[in-house]
Image: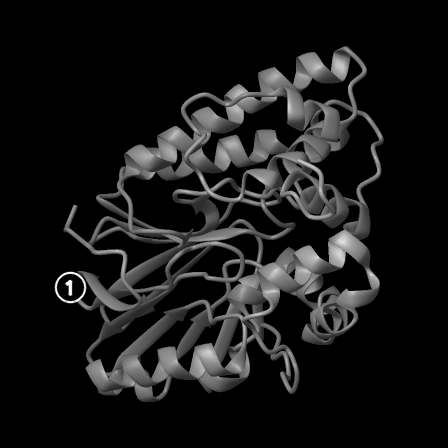
Amino acid sequence: MPEVPFTEGLHEVGAGVFAYLQPDGGWGWSNAGLVVDGDRSLLVDTLFDLAHTQRMLERMRRISPAAENIDVLVNTHANGDHCYGNELAGAAEIVATAACAAEMARTPPELLAGLVDGAENLGPAGAYVRAIFGAFDFHGITLVPPTRTFEGRLDLTVHDTPVELIEVGPAHTEGDLIAHLPEQRIVFSGDILFHGSHPIVWAGPVSNWIAACQTIIDLDPAVVVPGHGPVASVDAVATFKEYFEVLTREARSRFDAGLSPIEAARDISLTGYDTWGEPERLVVNITTLYREDFGGDPPSDAFTLFGSMAELAGYGGAR
């Protein structure tokens, strides 16, 4: 795979294929992609707010006239850091899975704006929310939804460049997809791969995420552009798959022993993954395993989950 530094901005990862990277890859600092062929263009995802999306689009337009008018925008999933900038792309068509479109309608930017604005009234959970989302401005965003949806698989072309959209959710969210460029052997994974940080399993089941990793591995890409973090090889996807397999075994034993998700998160030591960022997300992943994979019924509302992550991250004086 090409040497791609993890620096902010556009990086060419194949002929006419670019990754837009945002260090450090943590909460909200997502990646996107651009595919150009002749006068045609396809954009993979927008960013968390209008200012960051506008800066990305300006850089894309400087490197290719085809980016002036995006022909197709693909949203890999419904999290705002991959779709809240849709209105600025001016795309002729916005494509996502049907499940993604439905979920997107339930998570408008006004929701996050209100959460951040009212964070001071939410105790440790609010302090945590402000810390992870405070760099972004969720006001004044008009969320533009997909204009074309699909289930399973959709084949597109950017002039002569084939692009395969493959639905792999529910996993991270309810409607995840990956974008595969078979001729260049490149995959834009969306948040099926967080490279260098713990994932967060909002939807699950985790068994589906393991299967999604295997789908990418079977495609044998030379380059994987993750939803967060530096550009990777397929080996990073294999490591990610192993993480979920280990976590499933470890969480199952704690579930059988009657531990709560936060007790399990404190008890589990994931040797080999301890350098990954955002370790507090472990409690969400365990909660989803308990609920979706093991048949339990732990509290899984957003306030509880953010409160548990805040507690593990040391907000409110506990770790």
Residue 166: x and y, percent? 46, 50
Q: Give the tally of numbered discs.
A: 1
Residue 169: x and y, percent? 58, 45
Residue 46: x and y, percent? 47, 71
Q: Is residue 221 visible?
A: yes
Nearer the observer, 232 or 96: 232
Q: Is residue 309 left or right of residue 87?
A: right
Please give the residue where the numbered disc 1 appears in the rendered image.
15
- Element type where label 1 sits in the image: loop
Q: Residues within 10 Å of mark 1 (few under 14, many from 20)?
A: few
Q: Using the rendered view, name the quadrant where residue 104 is placed.
A: bottom right
Q: Residue at x 44, y 24 (%)?
A: 242
Nearer the observer, 236 or 312: 312
Q: Using the rendered view, name the quadrant where residue 156 is placed.
A: bottom left
Nearer the observer, 267 or 143: 267
The type of colouring in the image is: one colour
Q: Is residue 301 above or below residue 272?
A: below
- Image quadrant in which the C terminus is located: top right
Q: Tell me the amino acid under the disc marked 1.
A: Ala
Residue 51: x and y, percent? 48, 82
Point out the residue furthest to the front here. Answer: 317
Q: Is residue 280 left or right of residue 20?
A: right
Q: Is residue 29 above or below residue 265?
A: below
Q: Residue at x 83, y 32 (%)?
A: 298
Q: Using the rendered view, name the quadrant where residue 305 is placed.
A: top right
Q: Is residue 245 above or below residue 225?
A: above
Q: Residue at x 42, y 75 (%)?
A: 72
Q: Is residue 92 visible?
A: no
